[in-house]
Image (cartoon, grey):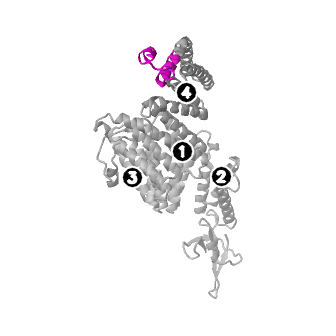
Amino acid sequence: GIGMLEHTCHKSKKDPQLKMATREIQRMERAVAVSGERKKLQSSMDAAMAKLDSCSGVGEKDAARKQAIACARRLTRTERDSLGEQSYAVARLKLKIAKLQCEGGNMEGGLDDAEEAIMTLKSVLGEKHSLLGASCIFSATVYEKRISLATSTPVTCPKPLKQLTSYCKSMMNRALELYADALEPLTFKYSYRSAEENEVQPEIGDIFHRIGRIYSKKGSHSSAVDAYRRAFEAYGVPWNAIKSGTINRTDFHPNAAIIWYELAELHFATNEYGDSIHACEKTMELILMVRSLGKSTSNDSIETLPILTCQVAAASYTALHRHPDSTRSYQKALSELKKARSSLSSSDRGKWLGTNEESKILRKIGRSLLREVKVEEAKIYFVDALRVLRSSADNEKCAELPGILLDIGDVHLRLEEFHDALKVLGSCIKLYADQGVPEYDSNVERARQLFDDAQCSLSNGLNKSTEKSHHPIRVLSAGSPTSDVSLLQTPAGTLPTTSTAMCSTLSSNRHIYCNETVSKSGKKTTSVIA
């Protein structure tokens, strides 16, 4: 080719075309010269990768991974020296190194290599190549993992994050850019398919799903909803069918149910409780369709989704003061948890359906029943939660345990079982201290306050187990000195008279116990005793 350019076309040595051809020949000559060395390094890297796959221990895997990275870097230097920095071979090796580094926990170093590889692939292969799309998705996923570590939240959690640092925001923006870059190769791929084949595009749906989740975490409500809308359509659930409330198609992707759940979380976080309940209902509707149609998913999230959905619905009902509906939703979550135990793998069963998860739901049911003023029923669920939690290994270190004891102590106090209240609340305070919870923590303060209330009531003879007299005791609830009044029996006693107007200054879980006496002349006297 160079001979023809020089002798037939009479090109000068300064001609750009001739220069480029000369450089390519020199590159190929260098590559041929090091072909033997390249084969040796490639064999070493393959052996290191095979060793990594066969290792089982953490230490062995780390050592094998370091060896594989070292071999890959030596091969990369060889390829770069012979083919140049901006070559396809170098880009592929950098991607391999990036994945190995991320698997070993060095996500920052892995991302640096991945970003360099993406820039090379864009220039060498163009923006529509599938390898470029896969590289962008990999890098964006790593950014999401780093955001998860920085904010201590699961990657799949769609809840808006508070007080995001500028560093987290920059990582979110970069992840969004990478997901957008990954869309073009996929759109190009689906453009060669028929209309019927394009009705469900799960890969595009997955990307818009992830974009929506990142926008949700950023607090960009409208952008998140728009991304979720496009994910619905890619999953085969048209947006107009969603708005009308009728989903007649059966060929939709099961991940559409997960998006409904994330929309429910998003609406709940923005105080749109009615919309959150509606999204929960749609989630459950799609889950039932997925189950009836026997659709399979790539993970077990569809089995645990009803448990989470029912809890979001219950929290929304609670915010709207619809406490009976809230209790029913929590009970439904408990039922779904027990149902899912039989269908999940052992690893996910331990992760999602362990004793801690069951005790949390039992405790939520108890609290919901307390809001309905069904104290005896609430006590049953709190005791069940304690029983379930105590059956788990290492339960004394569980952060949930003192909270359940606090709830049980509160119930004993409401039922005037003051001896039991003192015993349980004392254990609760000790556990908080053992776990290093500070004194100013709201739960510790509440436990101490309830403990003091129980002691005060017991010292004034208000326990049910003590001998009772026929003097009526008026219990005045906080907020109004004349409402929510009940009569108890307790030994007579008088303390300095105190105005019942004090009730308005008390918190909602405090009461004033007053002894009313009537003299022979008919004069009524009210004395505060607790």
State left or right for residue 55 relative to residue 182. right
Lateral position of residue 188 relative to residue 479, left or right: left
Where is residue 379 drawn, in percent x and y?
54, 55
Segment colored magenta: 1-28
Numbered disc in front, either 1 or 3: 1
Q: Residue at x 52, y 14 (%)?
A: 29
Q: Which residue is mark 4?
A: 94
Question: Horizontal and vertical percent for residue 447?
Answer: 65, 57
Disc 2 target residue:
428
Q: What is the secondary structure assignment of the residue under circle 2? A: helix
Which numbered disc flags the more N-terminal residue, 4 or 1? Answer: 4
The earlier-in-sequence mark between 2 and 4 is 4
N-terminal of the pair, mark 3 or mark 4, is: 4
| Amino acid, disc 3 | Glu
Q: Which residue is mark 1?
A: 172
Q: Residues within 10 Å of mark 3 (few under 14, many from 20)?
A: some
Mark 1 and mark 3 lie on one chain; the one further toward the N terminus is 1
